[in-house]
Amino acid sequence: MNGRINSGLGQIVIDTDVIATYAGSVAVECFGIIGMAAISMKDGLVKLLRIDSLKHGISVKITDDNKIQLNFHVIVAYGVNISTIADNLVNNVKYKVEAFTGMEIDKINIMVEGVRAID
């Protein structure tokens, strides 16, 4: 389902891919996030996604009451507190995505799929 915003002159429809791409770009700016992860269901392997395919590590769901639910699959930096990374990610994504879309974020789930050393 796409997000909908009613303006005075009509309705604005936001595709979930747009929200996922923007949320992915915000996420990789956060300290401690190495990148988004793609999981191979066949092998159970985790692969670091390139910058141009960040939306594949994020799933977006729009609820019936027009709120956003985000699921992030991330790879984090070695040696950084995961709880701190998650708090930073949630705060930044919530603030920036709500400002970008004009919609409310209902839930953000973070799945840490791997740990990598910082280059």
Image: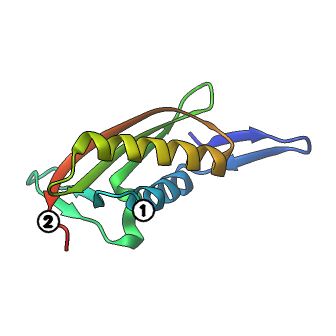
Which residue is under mark 1? 29
Q: How many marks?
A: 2
Type of amino acid at the residue the image marks with label 2:
Ala
Tell me which corner region of the image, top left, top right, bottom left or bottom right, holds residue 86: top left
Q: Is residue 38 above or below residue 102?
A: below
Residue 83 position within the rendered picture, expressed as x and y whole percent measured from the top left: 27, 39
Which residue is under mark 2? 117
Q: Residue at x 74, y 40 (%)?
A: 5
Residue 67 position within the rendered picture, expressed as x and y whole percent measured from the top left: 58, 32
Left or right: residue 78 versus residue 109 is left
Indicate how the structure is coloured in the image.
rainbow
Residue 109 position within the rendered picture, expressed as x and y whole percent measured from the top left: 35, 36
Q: Secondary structure at mark 1?
A: loop
Type of amino acid at the residue the image marks with label 1:
Glu
Which residue occupies the foreground of this view, 117 or 57? 117
Left or right: residue 91 versus residue 45 is right
What's the CA distance linking mark 1 and mark 2?
17 Å
Q: Residue at x 23, y 65 (%)?
A: 48
